[in-house]
Image (cartoon, helix red, strand yellow):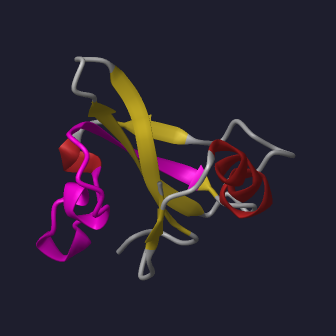
Amino acid sequence: MIGYWGGQSEFKTPDEVTIALAKSVYNQIGPGGMTFTMDRKAFPALAGNRPEHLLDSGANIVGVVYSEGWGIDDLGAAFLYFAQDECGGFYWHGLVFSATHFD
């Protein structure tokens, strides 16, 4: 699932996610400038909303990572969502992307 800040969330196939990452969400030419944190104090305020509420998926979200340095210009940010399935396994469920920072 990919969600866009101020827009909609979309379920995508693995191939569609790969294309979206390559074309607009991730700088494949110059990677390496991304930062990642699970420290909620470092997350943007989101007007008082919890990041779990940005992605309307029904999944059992068990972890959220905030990351900066996204987009083809490295000026974007993203929330990465990790979920747990009914068998107890963990998986990357999706992301919410912003071409600029969230707040």
Q: Residue furthest front?
A: 86
Q: Which residue lies furthest to the top in this view?
A: 88
Q: In this view, does 7 lie to the left or right of 37?
A: right
- The answer to whether residue 88 is seen in the rendering is yes
> As rendered, which of 67 and 86 lies closer to the eye?
86
Is 48 colored magenta in this rendering?
Answer: yes
Measured from the top left, where is residue 87 in percent x and y? 24, 18
Residue at (69, 54) in percent of width and height = 16
Q: Which residue lies furthest to the left in this view?
A: 48
Measured from the top left, where is residue 41 in percent x and y? 19, 47
Measured from the top left, where is residue 34 in percent x and y? 59, 42
Q: Which region shows up in magenta?
A: 43-69
Residue at (19, 76) in percent of width and height = 47
Is 86 colored magenta in this rendering?
Answer: no
Residue at (29, 36) in percent of width and height = 38
How many marks the image carries: the answer is: 0
Residue at (62, 63) in percent of width and height = 75
- From this view, report whether residue 41 is shown above or below residue 85: below
Q: Is residue 87 left or right of residue 96?
A: left
Q: In which quarter of the image is residue 85?
A: top left
Q: In this view, does 67 lie to the left or right of 89?
A: right
> As rendered, which of 100 and 95 lies closer to the eye?
95
- The answer to whether residue 4 is seen in the rendering is no
Q: Residue furthest right?
A: 29
